[in-house]
Image: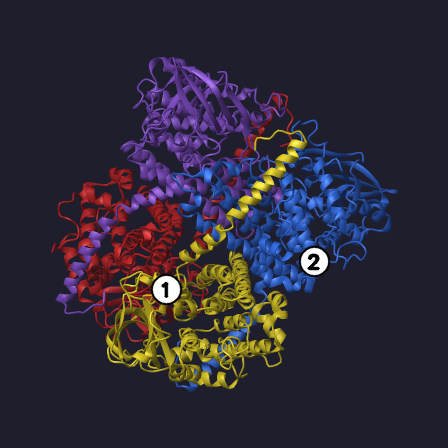
Chain colours: A blue, B purple, C red, D yellow
């Protein structure tokens, strides 16, 4: 038995073409450095040869015993982390351009295809490369806004993959899409900060390795500037008063051992030095927290869709699953679905690559339009691909025996996480509407010239 | 505190109009007998006052301890069954017209609206009325094809709600949508029948109350008539060799304590008297098993969609969940979604009612076209409504805190269960194509007359 | 050669089942009087045997010579009108219940299926039965709001089919969907009324038989009640100052000789007696003008879609049009399209029938919800069916050789005429949102009972 | 009054960013030569400053008099041709790489954006640049397959824009999507070739400047190789027996003076030297005729969609068209439509650019997958954008007063021209299915490794 899935003989170029398509590679190859290309090839091999074959083991290592489910880490992940680190596949998400000495020299465009590859596997592929949310965003916060002591205490072990972290923003009982609604109270008492609040959907808070929460709350609720009311503080996960109430489920999945947890902060006391950046700077931090990170999910989503399409191709050519003497691919309409899946994936990838390139050429703000388009279009397209693949699989497609239903559930959350589709569409539409005055000017000038042409030709018009 | 949700003062007419709409009621009221109407009103009250408020209790009574999860029945269901029975809300699905002395005098049209009501609650509402699958179909099998001894042993306790049952048809490793693919072996050895096979997605097989499996297999695999190879046998759930391997999950849900289980029959021996109807009659039985039952799911689906819309109305007028100073209903586009949800539900209900009425006027075969349309259109429409409602709820919508994600997962299975959408569409399209010769005849006659008219008018035409 | 398309031997029941489906007929038959049924059968025969075969002749009789195009009426229509009248198929749209002595005893439900039949043919089928817009609405205005002299002068010849009429409301340069925007000035000068305004999309204004315009304008623009500013006046088409500027096109079609015209009223003077109902009553009249008439278009649309499906069935079984050895119906996916077309038509018809029935049981206002749903859902569904049929036809489908492209263009206008989809959806959504307080009350009561049940069982809950 | 729409002060870069978006330009700029960029800028100015303002004049110069409609060429086109030629904007579609000395040095990627610009205006923008179908394809045929005499006689005047041409392939009464169905007979008689056939949808055949038809027919109908039965011949438009019967309409448009005509070839005799390439080479020629040309329509379609979006932006901010006190953009849902329009356009453009780049890097065959995706996705997306823009415009949107309905009609034909959507999807799906064996190999290897990992960990699995 071969110990790798990918033949060793395959060249890097051939491999990349197989995984992102010859057409796309021809379109972006000249934007890749040799390092970027080499890293991509290594990631492809790591994901396909190491991570995907380990998926069943991972799930088997998550305990079904309620007493252990949230206490035991699947061993295989820690093993994969070591392997990845030893190959230099580590913290690739962090741009050395912005964080000299810390991250990798990859451009966002290069990282985009790399992230796509990790999206082919469950979340633990990105975790194995230390590129998993919410740690990625939290590391950016520490790197960008933390002081040296905060960096030493929390950023270093995070970069080393020794601890994990949570970002506590979303609250129960309010509409969290509007950050000014936040109710968690953060107030100074002498040399301490006291926190009281009720959060939920705090990803990773169930993980025994989660050592720190970044908690967003209101320190100055009466400030007339509604964007200066918030502060962000560092809360050790084991601080007294931090109560992880229950894991929230996504469809029927609890994502143990990490979880998306309901957490109550009850009179949690931390030293004043745990304030990040300064009082009232919370809003500024969350705005800056996700820059390029806003489309990491989109990138991975492409890979998830590609995997769903592969499963669909396999399922509908499965010789054991012939109905009425034919494989599914020989029946009516599935070939069209496959074609549409291909088109949807291709268009999604191009959109994300264009957004990543625009971030590289300008920055996250300069790519606002492209990021917005990606966030809406890509997830919706991927959900359609997943749904078609599930349908081709019949009952198996919604079960624990493929990755499809789980992936569907995860992707479904991206339609409202970090802003619901509706908000992104609204922003995008308004961005477009800003062009209206210029369009009107153009139409008026055009009309004037057009009128003159008609007048010259002696033609009367009703327009 | 009032002990009922529905005000006692509300008249039956008002109540029905609230729940299925004044327009629909005006359309079908004259098809209801006084008994039908009275029963419908009782069911509305039972579901809204008794079942829905018990949902959280039901889920709390399903144990999370793996050792008990499949052994304990939520008490509340048995209590509700008693209540329902005492009110005469029992076995309403079974038509007294076809099974004199057993069922209820309701027409399919009347039962349709009743089933819709149970669809507003989780499955245990229909179970409480002893109208839950797969028992309903199995009771029809016993009533229609069983001999007296079989009826006494199994039908009576099923009708009494004392036991539950499973229908074992779907097999792993083959395409089950083609019944001729079945591999389970059923062979006679002396006075016994020996069964060997590997099934999965056997609903209810995990339930401790499940006393009997109806097992479909091949008794005559070489028979040149591929529809005479199958037989159906009665297997006591506790027969040696019946091995329930694992529950299959649907988007992470295991549906304990009932489950949709993988089951291996290993040298299971049953007496010859457990054969149903006769050797080689298996195909005939499954064809006859679901008559009107084919649209019971559709009926319930309407109710599920209505409930999802109610939750959406509540969520988007929730004063606690204002974002940027407005409730969701005051933001852009959700009002349109609500309108579309209403339209989709209304069209779905009318289609199912028309199908039910056609079954009443002819029979299940005579309503093949209407049943086929319902099966495809209704579930897809309901999934759209659920998805819109989930999206309005944000994260809460996919969690355990509303019924939406669970309902989505359940309904999603209906797009392939009892035949995938694609097969129903294919059949429906072919049914329609049968009209082609008549259409051609009409076109040709029309063309001839048209030609004559033009000729008479002295007009030349290129057509 | 047979002189009829429909075999004389076919019974009325068989005929109806062929044209609206056995399932629908089974659903509504008991709502038909013998007269309704008999009339329906006569209309089916009239449309299929007389009108559809005359379509080519009709189009050939519309002159392509610009000098005659708007002056000559296709002879065949006047012949068909005579035939229809002689068979009693005349003014069927007008309800004798509301206009004793004038109209027909048909219910709206009965008329619905009749109108559907006329929708199978171009507009001239409804014209042949004197049931064509805008005359239908205008006759209602005269019958409902006109005084005796106005009735004698205009209603009588309209009811006799001797003249035609226009309804002049829509104006250029404003958003006409908001009637308060209207700018046309209607002012009294002595015993006369003077009208100045610029209208467009005035259907029928190009027709040489068009004898009268009902013109909506502002008589009291400063009135603080914006719904009391408008008046409606009767303008003879040949009054000095009535200038028909040009026909507007719909996807290239000018609908000669009727046209949808741009019309300027320049100092048009009419006697004071031409005011309808009274000063400031214009808004009231247009509100009342279309009652049941609001869904006449929807009814006809079903018939158009049925015809498109018939053509699709013919086209894809056309033996002359085999590609790669197969008819279109034998290629992949068209069978699914046919199935969806059937479903969409069926759901549309049921919705319209339900709306018509609700009008019968209450009135147009009482059926507001059902009417709104019909207006949005039916046209969109029919456009999809037409588009699928066009696609099956290839180039022929968009040409003058089938009715498809023309019908598409006509139906497309219904997505904004009499209120754009968006407005209907908004109204419908708001209607639904009115239920929110009741839903909240229900949820709160349910929650209270549910809490009590859990408390009694000693279970703590996070909800 | 300024004589140009675009301010002279605008730099080339700024201009390009305005027209194709800053993000896309950042993505492809490095693939443009200085010449490509300079030419693009010139074309933008030419289309916006010269062509679009001339649209009304063009339409006014097409006669409505049936006697002149097909005989008079709108003067303005010939004037624009001269201007374009003088600016070097001429025959840009023809690649100098493949036709040294004839065409332009632009890559397909560069030409793609240029073609997009011409798509913003009616067809006469591409005609003005001598880049209009069917001449483009016909010039390629002459350049690629013609002998010197054929080139001198026909290619030179075509390249000079002195004559126009037609390509006669599609036939009435057969399914033309299958070229082997062709019935037109082409047979040798002595030194002559005799042609008999019945074609339709022959674009440009109505144009008085159309001097030559390339006619496809069967010269060897009994040849066992069905792809060797066809030949292609050059037929002077004025040859005796060439009968242009009637223009076909697309929706209600006849596209005078060019037309898409029904043409009968009745005993047309041409010299033997008018055979192209050789007997039986017809199929080969049509395969080679459209290489990159296959996506010229897609490229232009992007521009059409951009223009429709501009009109939508203008319409929904039109201060004169406020309804209920608000512009359309301030009402509910249109902002979302605008956002979706932007996304659809962006994804379409990226797909076409990727296809064009793949043609550049390989050739038309190597880009088969990308071309196929473009053909299906782009037109459908553009139709949606047009439909949304029409809907925003209300009645005006379907009339002659905007370019929307006309553009919709034209684009609608692209869903079946050069192969219907269904065929492209089928091919694309099959291309994808070719990967199935490789996917299976991967799955099997993955499963083996996964099994080994589980075995090593001592875990039993049901998978």
Q: Dot 1: what SS? A: loop
> Depth check: B332 or A118 in front?
A118
> Depth check: B260 or B132 in front?
B260
Q: Quadrant of the N terminus of chain B?
A: top right
> Label 1 marks which chain's residue?
C
Query: Left or right: where does residue C229 sit relative to residue B77?
Result: left
Mark 2 highlights which residue? Answer: A36
The answer to which image quadrant residue B346 occupies is top left
> Depth check: B96 or D320 in front?
B96
Q: Dot 2: what SS? A: helix
**Is label 2 or label 1 in front?**
2
Query: Left or right: where does residue B168 sit relative to residue C356?
Result: right
Q: Quadrant of the C terminus of chain B?
A: bottom left
Mark 1 highlights which residue? Answer: C169
Q: Decide if residue A239 is in sight here.
A: yes
Return the x and y of residue C328 as percentages of the image width and height: 33, 53
Query: Left or right: where does residue B332 sit relative to residue B461?
Result: right
Return the x and y of residue C5 as percentages of the image width and height: 17, 53
Return the x and y of residue D189 as percentages of the image width and height: 24, 76
The total of numbered circles placed on residues is 2
Q: Decide if residue C246 is in sight here.
A: no
Going 21% across and 41% down the picture, which residue do you hit? C33
Could you give the CA–CA distance between mark 2 and mark 1, rounded to whole angstroms?
66 Å
> What is the crowding at mark 2: few (fewer than 14 residues within 10 Å), some, or many (at least 20)?
many
Query: Left or right: where does residue B41 sit relative to residue A221?
Result: left
- Outermost residue toward the right? A191
> What is the crowding at mark 1: few (fewer than 14 residues within 10 Å), some, or many (at least 20)?
many
């Amino acid at each position: 038995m071969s110990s790798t899935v990918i033949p060793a003989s395959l060249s890097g170029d051939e491999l990349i073409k197989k995984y992102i398509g010859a057409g796309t590679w021809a379109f972006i190859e000249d934007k890749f450095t040799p390092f970027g290309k080499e890293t991509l090839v290594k990631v492809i091999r790591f994901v396909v040869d190491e991570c995907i074959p380990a998926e069943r083991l991972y799930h088997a290592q998550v305990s079904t015993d309620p007493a252990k489910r949230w206490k035991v880490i699947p061993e295989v992940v820690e093993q994969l982390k070591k392997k990845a680190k030893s190959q230099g596949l580590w913290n690739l998400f962090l741009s050395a351009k912005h964080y000299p000495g810390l991250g990798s020299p990859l451009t966002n465009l290069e990282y985009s295809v790399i992230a796509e590859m990790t999206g082919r596997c469950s979340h633990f592929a990105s975790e194995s490369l230390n590129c998993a949310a919410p740690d990625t965003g939290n590391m950016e916060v520490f790197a960008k806004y933390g002081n040296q002591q905060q960096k030493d205490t929390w950023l270093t072990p995070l970069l080393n993959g020794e601890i994990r972290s949570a970002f506590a923003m979303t609250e129960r009982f309010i509409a969290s899409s509007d950050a000014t609604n936040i109710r968690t109270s953060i107030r100074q008492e002498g040399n301490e900060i006291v926190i009281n609040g009720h959060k939920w959907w705090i990803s990773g808070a169930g993980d025994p390795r989660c050592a720190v929460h970044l908690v967003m709350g209101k320190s100055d609720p009466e400030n007339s500037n509604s964007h200066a009311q918030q502060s962000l503080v560092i809360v050790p996960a084991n601080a007294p008063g931090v109560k992880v109430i229950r894991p929230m489920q996504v469809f029927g999945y609890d994502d143990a051992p990490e979880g998306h947890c309901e957490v109550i902060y009850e009179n949690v006391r931390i030293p004043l030095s745990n304030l990040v950046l300064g009082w009232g700077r919370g809003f500024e931090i969350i705005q800056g927290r996700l820059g390029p990170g806003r489309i990491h999910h989109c990138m991975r989503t492409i890979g998830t869709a590609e995997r769903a399409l592969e499963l669909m191709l396999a399922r509908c050519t499965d010789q054991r699953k012939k109905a009425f003497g034919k494989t599914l691919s020989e029946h009516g309409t599935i070939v069209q679905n496959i074609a549409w899946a291909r088109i949807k994936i291709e268009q999604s990838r191009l959109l994300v690559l264009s957004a990543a390139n625009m971030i590289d050429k300008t920055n996250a703000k300069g790519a606002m339009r492209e990021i917005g388009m990606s966030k809406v279009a890509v997830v919706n397209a991927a959900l359609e691909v997943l749904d078609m693949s599930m349908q081709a699989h019949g009952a198996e497609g919604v079960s624990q025996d493929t990755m499809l239903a789980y992936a569907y559930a995860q992707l479904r959350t991206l339609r409202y996480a970090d802003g619901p589709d509706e908000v992104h569409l609204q922003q995008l539409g308004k961005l477009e509407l800003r062009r209206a005055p210029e369009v009107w000017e153009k139409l008026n000038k055009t009309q004037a010239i057009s009128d003159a042409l008609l007048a010259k030709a002696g033609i009367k018009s009703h327009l």
